[in-house]
Image: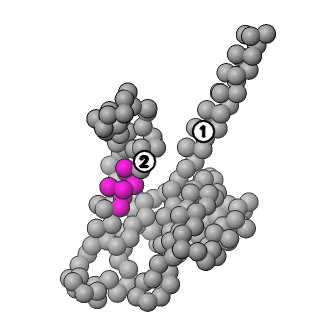
C-alpha cells in the first residue's frame, strides 16, 4: 500500500539522505550507518497523525478485492488540521499570502512535471516552507495532478545558518591575514 511503499520506503529514504551526517567513507556500509542514525531518531508515525483513504472507484479496478481497505493515498499531519478540516482545504487555502502568484502559476502549469518552493501556513498561522512536485497523470481517462509536498523549513533554516557561519568564518580569516 501507499503507506508502506511510498512513505515507509521512499520518503523515509529521502529524509535519511538529506538529514544524515557525512559518512566516514563512500562505502555502502558507512552510508547505511549514517542513515540508520537518522531513522532511529524518527518517532513512530501514529495513525492519528495521518489521513488515509482510497480513490473513488479503486475497488472497481480489475484485480482489486471489492472489500479492500488498502490505502491508495495518505497525508501525514503537517498542517495540524483535523482529518475533516484538511480534506476540506485546497492548496490555495493553506498558502502564505506572499506566495499567492507563485502558487497559482504552479497549480496552473500545463507540463508533465513541475517543481516549486512555496510558503504555506499551518493552522496555527506558523509559516512553513514546502517544496512541491506536480505530475500530470490520467486517472480513469481524466487528466489529474498528483502533487507531493515536502516540508523544507528546517533544511532552509539550516542552510541559512551555514551560509551565515561561513561568511563569519571568512571574515575571521580575512582579519587574521590582515
**169 over 39 or under it: above or below:** above
User: How far separated are the C-alphas under marks 1 and 2?
Assistant: 16 Å
| 152, 49: nearer the viewer | 152
Return the residue nearer the eye: 137 or 104. Answer: 137
Q: Earlier in the sequence, mark 1 or mark 2?
A: 2
SS at mark 1?
helix
At mark 2, the secondary structure is helix
Residue behind mark 2: 15
Q: Residue 121 appears at what percent x and percent y? A: 62, 58
Q: Is residue 19 visible?
A: yes
Question: Residue at image x 73%, y 68%?
Answer: 101
* Residue 11 image label: none
Q: Quadrant of the C terminus?
A: top right
**Percent coordinates x, y for residue 11 in the rendering:** 40, 55
Residue shown at the point (45%, 40%) measured from the top left:
19
Does the image show residue 93? no
Of residues 20 and 98, the one nearer the viewer is 20
**Is residue 11 magenta-colored?**
yes
Residue name at image x 37 percent, y 51 percent: 12
Residue 159's disc number: 1
Segment colored magenta: 6-13
Nearer to me, 176 or 149: 176
Q: Is residue 130 placed above or below 86 in the rendered structure?
A: above
Amino acid at each position: 500500500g501507499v503507506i508502506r511503499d511510498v512513505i515507509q520506503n521512499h520518503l523515509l529514504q529521502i529524509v535519511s539522505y538529506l538529514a544524515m551526517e557525512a559518512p566516514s567513507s563512500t562505502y555502502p556500509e558507512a552510508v547505511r550507518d549514517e542513515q540508520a542514525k537518522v531513522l532511529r531518531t524518527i518517532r513512530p508515525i501514529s495513525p492519528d497523525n495521518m489521513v488515509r483513504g482510497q480513490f473513488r472507484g479503486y475497488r472497481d479496478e480489475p484485480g482489486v478485492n471489492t472489500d479492500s481497505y488498502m490505502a491508495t493515498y495518505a497525508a501525514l499531519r503537517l498542517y495540524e488540521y483535523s482529518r475533516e478540516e484538511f480534506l476540506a482545504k485546497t492548496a490555495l487555502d493553506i498558502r502564505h499570502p506572499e506566495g499567492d502568484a507563485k502558487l497559482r502559476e504552479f497549480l496552473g502549469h500545463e507540463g508533465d512535471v513541475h517543481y516549486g518552493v512555496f510558503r504555506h501556513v499551518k493552522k496555527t498561522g506558523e509559516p512553513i516552507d514546502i517544496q512541491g512536485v506536480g505530475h500530470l497523470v490520467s486517472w480513469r481517462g481524466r487528466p489529474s495532478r498528483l502533487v507531493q509536498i515536502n516540508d523544507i523549513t528546517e533544511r532552509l533554516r539550516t542552510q541559512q545558518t551555514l551560509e551565515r557561519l561561513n561568511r563569519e568564518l571568512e571574515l575571521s580569516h580575512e582579519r587574521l591575514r590582515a
